[in-house]
Amino acid sequence: MQTTVPFEAGARARGRTAERVPVSVVAATVAGNALEFFDFIAYAFFAVYIGKAFFPASTPFMSLLLSVGVFGVGFVFRPLGGIIIGAYADRAGRKPAMLLTIILITAGTMALALTPSYATIGVAAPVIVVVCRLVQGLALGGEVGPASVFLIEIAPEGRRGLYSSWQLASQGLAALAASGCGLLLSQLLSPADLAAWGWRVPFVLCLALIPVAVFLRRAMPETLHMPVQTGVEPRRRSVSLWAHSGFIVLAVLVILGGTVSTYAANYMTTYAIATLHLPASTALAATVIGGASTFLFALLGGWLADRYGRRIVMMLPRLVLTLVTWPLFLLIDLWPGGPTVYITTIALTGLTALGATASFVAIPELLPRPVRATGFAVAYAVGVSLFGGSTQFIITWLLGATGNPSSPAWYVTATSLISLVAMFAVPESRDRQLES
């Protein structure tokens, strides 16, 4: 059966869509996005095992620190991916840009899944892993902008928040799938087998599912309906993007708080194993819970943003998170165990998803079509690169330097305060017509 989207000629000219959008179109966007984040999230909570495989050190702590440091390396290329692939999406279309990111993530995932350990091939192993992270960072830096913009541009009137929420909800699905796979592996395999080869299984599964995402994305429509003017268009687009640089900086600060709390939540598995010394199955369950929480609260946040506006849904959850993060980590310190870890994970992921969904729709809504994908991609990639890539390293360093299990809360709280100030400066955009 052929999949079609009811774009009308008049609707295209006015920059709006018809009221009906097939589920397969949204699924195509979500599938690719989820698979790409599946890979990144799988690395995050298998960091302990990846560190042992590729980064042997004198102590387990140093091995873990090297592993999360290389996790951060993947963020170095995100701004470059945002600029290059975002500009490609604004010039050639959203669809070809999203197909390109799938190809890049396939190459990075294949390298990580198949690279032998340090014990087998020596220093070549960590070098390959670093290159793999750079390729994946390039792909993810270019994925979020076109995917988010595409969801907004196909959304019916009054439902841009709900449609956009699937971008973040798909990240929750990715965390849920990756952590569910890890939890199952921890139940089926011995600790020795999990460290030796079991951690590779999620990456192999990701490779097997990527052709499905490619197939779905090939059938997607295109929402960029602009004539390409060779010769003058690149210069005009560059000037236009620069004209919005102040807003992009503001958007980076808005994204800052959600990025730090998201990657702090992703770190809970490593935190539970390395700091609280909980069983691997208990620790991995935190990521399962976090993924489910992100999925549900992201969709709720999109609905609330359409009903009550973007600014209030951005600010209120971030304010609550600012107030409760430190008490929650103090609670973990007093009663370390599964229940307190799970409560903290739900708070970090749920409140973050509520607010982040509203910001993910507000930022593109406030940008004109010629730089919408580039502007949002750059804001997201820079915010995540500067703060997401360093979060797990900073948390690991804080824990090692202070010996205080509640020290991660300091960083989450401080960055949340900065984001609150930036959110207050963002105009309300719920009833705003998308600029052409």
Image (spheres, rainbow, N blue to C red):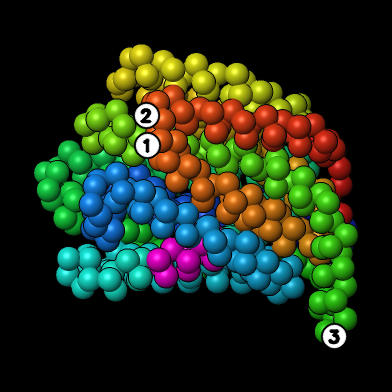
Residue kind at label 1, given as amino acid type: Gly
Q: Residues within 10 Å of mark 2 (few under 14, many from 20)?
A: few
Residue lying at 79% horizontally and 62% vertically, measured from the top left: 371
x and y percent of residue 16 in the render? 81, 54
Cα separation between marks 2 and 1:
5 Å
Kind of element beneath mark 1: helix
Kind of element beneath mark 3: loop
Cα separation between marks 3 and 1:
55 Å
x and y percent of residue 178 in the render? 35, 47
Closer to the camera: disc 3 or disc 1? Answer: 1
Look at mark 1 in the image and give the residue it sits on: 400
Tell me the chief SS of the magenta region.
helix
Region in magenta: 130-140
Look at mark 3 in the image and give the residue it sits on: 231
Say which mark, if any, is on residue 403: 2
- Decide which of 181, 74 is in the foreground and name it: 74
Cα separation between marks 2 and 3:
59 Å
Q: Are marks 2 and 1 in contact (CB under 8 Å)?
A: yes
